[in-house]
């Protein structure tokens, strides 16, 4: 089972589950935890092979690394803790996992908050994936990871986010990185399916105005979803919960609070 931490609230029945992105860990939510646990029950978890969660030990597991496989990891924690419904807050690749969970188990998802959401891979990102695929077995994975983080978060005010994700990614093993990288080859077809379906679960997209690779596609997506809304934060990059934590916290807490207990 995944490593997780829970912060129960004495008076609230509302659960908020945080899902980090590839290479990160639950520690990326350090700017959210204090404020959210004042009002909600909070669940933080480390995805497989990240943070304090153990990777699969045998090579036989390599072919089982799929988005459905990792999504089931999250569901296992929810079931273990007897959490029937939760709001979900994700960042980057974590938003893909949350959306996949909502597709498979919509009854478990009250709402989705998608920070730095990945809806479509533009040509620049796909070229990076091709480049990475050529060299992923030849160079230390952290070199490729640094390249990806710089492409996604290129501006000087994104430095804190880049540093945070690189620091957490250093805790991965090379083999674990390769498993997740291989899993990334499935993402285009999954995103295509997401874009073609109005899931009708309340969804708040929180995007930085400087999230150059992913913001344009999210703007189009919001227009097609009947229960979706977009909060765009100016002078902010991909990792909105770190770069503009105060704004993020206030708006997301208000959004979740509107659903009541």
Image (cartoon, rainbow, N blue to C red):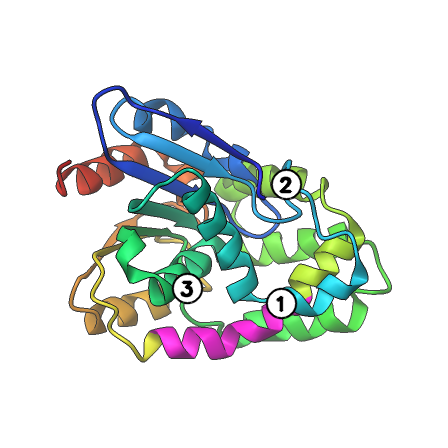
Residue hosting label 2: 53
Query: In the picture, which quadrant includes the C terminus?
Result: top left
Residue at 42% across / 44% down in the picture? Answer: 78
Question: Where does the magenta region start and end?
Answer: 182-194
Residue hosting label 3: 100
The answer to which of marks 1 and 2 sits earlier in the sequence is 2
Crowding near pointer 3: few (<14 within 10 Å), some, many (20+)? many
How far, Cα to Cα, is label 3 from label 2? 20 Å
Q: Nearer the viewer, residue 74 or 36?
A: 74
How far, Cα to Cα, is label 1 from label 2? 18 Å
Residue at 57% across / 40% down in the picture? Answer: 25
Crowding near pointer 2: few (<14 within 10 Å), some, many (20+)? some
Query: In the picture, which quadrant includes the N terminus?
Result: top right
How far, Cα to Cα, is label 3 from label 1? 14 Å
Residue hosting label 1: 183
* Residue 47, image x, y percentages: 57, 47
Q: Quick check: 143 left or right of 112?
A: right
Whether residue 100 is situated above or below residue 13 in the rendered picture:
below
């Amino acid at each position: 089972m995944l490593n997780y931490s829970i912060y129960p609230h004495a008076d609230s029945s509302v659960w908020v589950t945080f899902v980090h992105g590839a290479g990160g860990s639950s520690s990326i939510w350090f700017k959210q935890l204090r404020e959210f646990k004042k009002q909600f029950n909070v669940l933080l978890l480390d995805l497989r092979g990240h943070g304090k969660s153990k990777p699969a030990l045998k090579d036989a597991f390599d072919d089982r690394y799929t988005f459905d496989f990792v999504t089931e990891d999250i569901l296992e924690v929810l079931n273990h803790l007897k959490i029937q419904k939760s709001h979900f807050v994700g960042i980057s690749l974590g938003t893909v996992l949350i959306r996949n969970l909502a597709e498979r188990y919509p009854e478990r998802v009250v709402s989705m908050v998608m920070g730095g959401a990945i809806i479509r891979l533009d040509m620049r990102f796909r070229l990076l994936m091709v480049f990475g695929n050529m060299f992923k077995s030849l160079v230390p994975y952290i070199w490729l990871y640094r390249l990806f983080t710089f492409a996604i978060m290129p501006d000087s005010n994104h430095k804190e986010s880049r540093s945070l994700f690189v620091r957490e990614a250093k805790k991965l093993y090379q083999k674990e990185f390769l498993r997740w990288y291989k899993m990334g080859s499935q993402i285009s077809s999954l995103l295509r399916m997401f874009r073609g379906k109005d899931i009708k679960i309340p969804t708040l997209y929180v995007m930085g105005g400087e999230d150059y690779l992913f913001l344009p596609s999210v703007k189009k997506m919001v227009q097609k979803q009947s229960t979706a809304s977009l909060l765009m934060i100016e002078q902010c990059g991909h990792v909105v919960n770190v770069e503009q934590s105060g704004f993020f916290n206030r708006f997301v807490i208000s959004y979740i609070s509107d659903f009541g207990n």
